Amino acid sequence: MRYISTRGGVAPISFSQAVMMGLATDGGLLLPERIPTVSAEQLRAWAGLSFQQLAIQVITPFLTPGEAVSDRLPELVERSFATFSHPDITPVTRAGDHWILELFHGPTLAFKDVALQFLGNLFEMLLKAEGGRLNILGATSGDTGSAAIHGVRGREGIHVFILHPHNRVSPIQERQMTSVLDANVHNIAIRGSFDDGQTIVKTLFNDLAFKDAYRLGAVNSINWARILAQIVYFFYAWGRVTGGDPHQKVLFSVPTGNFGDIFAGYMALRMGLPVERLILATNRNDILVRFMESGEYRTGEVNPTISPSMDIQISSNFERYLYYLLDEDPAAVRGEMERLRVEGVFAVSEARRRQAGEIFSARRVGEEETLARIQATWERHGVLLDPHTAVGVEAAGNEPGAICLATAHAAKFAEAVHRAVGFDPPVPPPLEGLLERPTRCRILDPDPEAVRAFIREVLG
Ligand SMILES: *Cc1c(COP(=O)(O)O)cnc(C)c1O
């Protein structure tokens, strides 16, 4: 497989090159040149595989033959998921009419561990092969940062710089990042929003001289390897729920912020996974819902909510979907992205909006509904949802049999859960004593120059 940019400015590159490039050098996002397809026979066979075996099957067609990753994939997969506390890695359970796909059994208790444990091992392998070094730069609304830090802490040849919005992540999220004191981990609190952090990261990545000089790599879901690892659990959940009947379509409900997780679901669908629809669930930061309703993609103000990992008004991965919606025309994508940058808005035709609506059902869920859903699911089914998962379950509403992605452990967002059910969720081992641990963090203004100076200061 070769990789190209949504904006058409990158000559086809290999899988390893795509992983190291992160954001495409033309400002776009990298995508496989074509989407591999899966036959009914394969679907049937894959339903009997373990998560790790399945991961190898799903990932292999996306690799570039002849690269070292191909030979070492089984070892990579084995190591990446050995840090999960559940033998099924992403078990599928039930809460009343809905299936719950539990994605929170990794070291930081959020779904992002699935991809970032894989990416951490992948980076290390690629760097060892070429004897190079890498400086990871990423912005986080909370969960990506801790998952990235835990994915690469203590690894040789890698430094990681993570920007989080100062005082706008939960105390647990903050400590999961700032209490990691390994010398290669550098936390930066930005006096601003997540989008400010993401804009700084994009600015530094677009400064190609700086990016090359400091060998910057990406861990945000702009990195293709993250999407790839996430495709696996859509196949896994389908297999567990249907037993591998290729005629049985399922519905997924995906709590969405940066459009990464749901884009992985879209890729699974395009590969041939029998998916009826993808429910795109947002909190009141609803740019994606507004797009699905009006065809207009217009950025707005970010409103803090009890599901902070979805407090996003510029969904980076949406560009990947837009590429397909605009018939894989990079010039058209480039045009719309330029309009977004200059005017803060772009729009697609009514026909295209309808086309998107055939795949995505978009729903916005408010704070009160989220709390009520946590309470009802606890009282009726004895299952504790975190607020992000609750947004997805609420959006799935009356769709029996929907597979709802549980993106975080309830204990990670204890305050909101307490408000809903009147008690603190039990604390799982990775969080014990967390708030008492010593921390390290630098607070900076929302200015690319301040971050650039800090990186120079650390790396010399
Ligand atoms: C990141 C995150 C999301 C949103 O996922 P995207 O891929 O950004 O759409 C949802 N829930 C939790 C708990 C998260 O950490």
Image: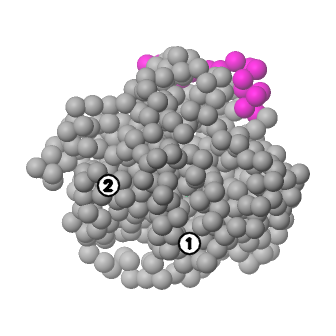
Q: In this rendering, is residue 435 above or below 246? A: below
Spot occupied by residue 409 in the image (x, y as percentages of width and height): 57, 70
Give me the residue at 83% from left, 65% from top.
243
Give me the residue at 47% from left, 43% from top.
15
Q: Which mark is residue 129?
A: 2
Which range of residues does the magenta coloring cover? 341-357
Q: In this rendering, is residue 358 above or below 191? A: above
Residue at the disc numbered 1: 105
Task: Return the disc, 2 or 1, that comes first in the chain's sequence.
Answer: 1
Callout 2 touching callout 1 (CB < 8 Å) = no
Please tell me whether residue 35 belongs to the stretch shown in magenta.
Answer: no
Relative to residue 186, is residue 102 drawn left or right?
right
Q: In this rendering, is residue 12 above or below 200? A: above
**From mark 2 to mark 1, how far is it between C-alphas?**
30 Å
Spot occupied by residue 237 in the image (x, y as percentages of width and height): 72, 62
Helix, strand or loop under label 2: helix
